[in-house]
Amino acid sequence: MITCLADTLFPRAGQATVTVLEHLGCDVVFPAEQTCCGQMHGNTGYRDDGLGLARRACRVFADAERVVCPSASCVGWLRETAPMLAAAAGDDALVAELRGLAPRMRELTELIIDDLGVEDVGASFPHTVTYHPTCHSLRGLHLGERPVRLLRAVRGLQLVPLPSAEECCGFGGTFALKNADVSMAMLADKVRCVGDSGAEVATAVDGSCLMQIGGALSRQRTGVRTMHLAEILAARE
């Protein structure tokens, strides 16, 4: 599942996901009829629209053995938030569909670590990297050390700690638009911490947070770049 952000703005994250999975022996299928999973709508209060798109996702991925996604927030929506909203709406049929999808939904690092039992994906990336645990990955999916374990196995990569790593970057979807001043203050703290880490590259499992952080790093001409974790795992430098 490519996600809207990867499809429209960061296609390399999706391409890298396919590269990594195929390298690990997976048969990757990309249903062209997929659309937004509904997260943006549901999180903004448009419950019916969001659930309509979640229903479509259930239909599109009905025959998949696993549904892997390079976004913890989209996985969290389909696996946790959408079923809760569907239950509140009294849509028992959709609840059943989502419960059928949930055990097959995987964020990329979950699939690699838990399902495939792999930590070293054969990547090589000789750069200093810091990892930002996004809110959805940290507090929603509880990914824990999975992304870090994969990064530690990358040849040549020096993983440096991110100060105040568990602090939000301030994006939060429409939060960044509706509460711009608060969002920018949170972002300023995060960018300062990225700079203090001494990293050349900041990575995460959610493109939305990388867009927020990367935008500020670029505007401030820090020389630090952002890359989705999948891109690092696909690297053979």
Image (cartoon, rainbow, N blue to C red):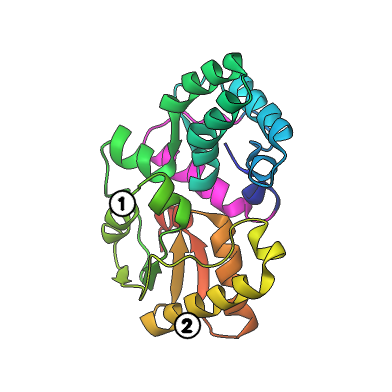
Q: Which residue corresponds to mark 2? A: 192
Position of the N terminus, as image quadrant, is top right
Across and down, in percent, residue 21 comes to: 43, 39
Please report the residue visible at 72 percent of the width from the left and 30 percent of the height from the top.
Answer: 48
Q: In the rendered image, which residue does mark 1 sit on?
A: 144
Where residue 106 appears, x then y in whole percent?
A: 43, 36
Q: Is residue 128 above or below residue 211?
A: below
Left/right of residue 46 with respect to residue 110 in the rendered view:
right
Instruction: Reply yes or no: does residue 174 show up in magenta.
Output: no
Q: Say if residue 144 shows up in the picture.
A: yes
> Does label 1 or label 2 sit earlier along the sequence?
1
Q: Is residue 33 visible?
A: no
> Where residue 9 sits: x, y (%)?
68, 56
Q: Nearer the viewer, residue 130 or 232?
A: 130
User: In which quadrant of the rendered image does the C terminus lie?
Assistant: bottom left
Q: Which residues make up the magenta segment?
A: 9-30
Residue located at (31% from left, 59% from top): 154
Q: Against 62, is 135 above or below?
A: below
**Callout 1 amino acid:** Gly
> Which quadrant of the figure has residue 193?
bottom left
Secondary element at image label 1? loop
Q: Amino acid at mark 2?
A: Arg
Give the residue drawn at x 54%, y 38%: 77
Work out whether 93 lies above or below 7. Answer: above
Quarter of image, res 123: bottom left
Q: Residues within 10 Å of mark 2 (few under 14, many from 20)?
A: few
